Amino acid sequence: MTDTNPNRLVWTEIPVTDLKQANIFYETVLKAPLTEDDQGPQTMLMLPGMSDNGPCGHLYQGKPVTAGDGITAHLAIDGELADAMERVKGGGGKVISDIITIPAGSFFYATDPDGNSLGIFKY
């Protein structure tokens, strides 16, 4: 057995129509900087992982799915979910649900400015 993260989800890629706007939104909601990576065929913005785990996904210039379609990427935050709800709204996204509590923590559903479905999670 290796010391790697045992979670089934390895990586997420989120398509956005405007990288600059998406960078502002995700940095505002996560309260953490995204890192630009232009080593591949197109520029990407790397989503920061928790602590020193490295990135957990990226944003790329692409065509988001229509509202209600596609997957939901759940992103963990530090701090309070009520504060994150305000950051989502202030950044141009939408809060879709109240806070939902599960054994591992709590989360709420939201969308980013492009309509991508998000779960904002607190352990």
Image (cartoon, rainbow, N blue to C red):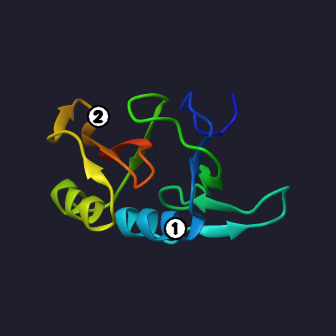
Q: Which residue is mark 2?
A: 104
Q: Residues within 10 Å of mark 1 (few under 14, many from 20)?
A: some
Q: Is residue 58 above or below residue 73?
A: below
Is residue 108 placed above or below 32 in the rendered structure?
above
Spot occupied by residue 105 in the image (x, y as percentages of width and height): 25, 39
Nearer to me, 56 or 19: 19
Residues at marks 2 and 1, CA–CA distance in whole angstroms: 28 Å
Residue at 57% across, 56% down = 17
**Residue highlighted by disc 1:** 23
With respect to residue 24, does 108 lie above or below?
above
Q: Who is closer to the viewer here, 77 or 104?
A: 77
108 lies left or right of 51: left
Mark 1 is on which residue type?
A: Asn
Tally of marks: 2
Across and down, in percent, residue 99 comes to: 16, 41
Where is residue 40? Give x, y as percent: 84, 57
Marks 2 and 1 in Cβ contact (< 8 Å):
no
Q: Is residue 76 left or right of residue 85?
A: right
Q: Please provide percent x and percent y for residue 85.
A: 22, 56
Mark 2 residue element: loop
- Where is the N terminus found, in terms of image quarters? top right
**Residue at position x 65%, y 55% in the image:** 61
Q: Residue at position x 58%, y 55% from top?
A: 53
Helix, strand or loop at label 1? It is helix
Q: Nearer the viewer, mark 2 or mark 1?
A: 1
Earlier-in-chain disc, 2 versus 1: 1
Instruction: Write the residue at 52% across / 67% down.
Output: 23
**Does 87 sit left or right of 57 as displayed?**
left
Under mark 2, the amino acid is Ala
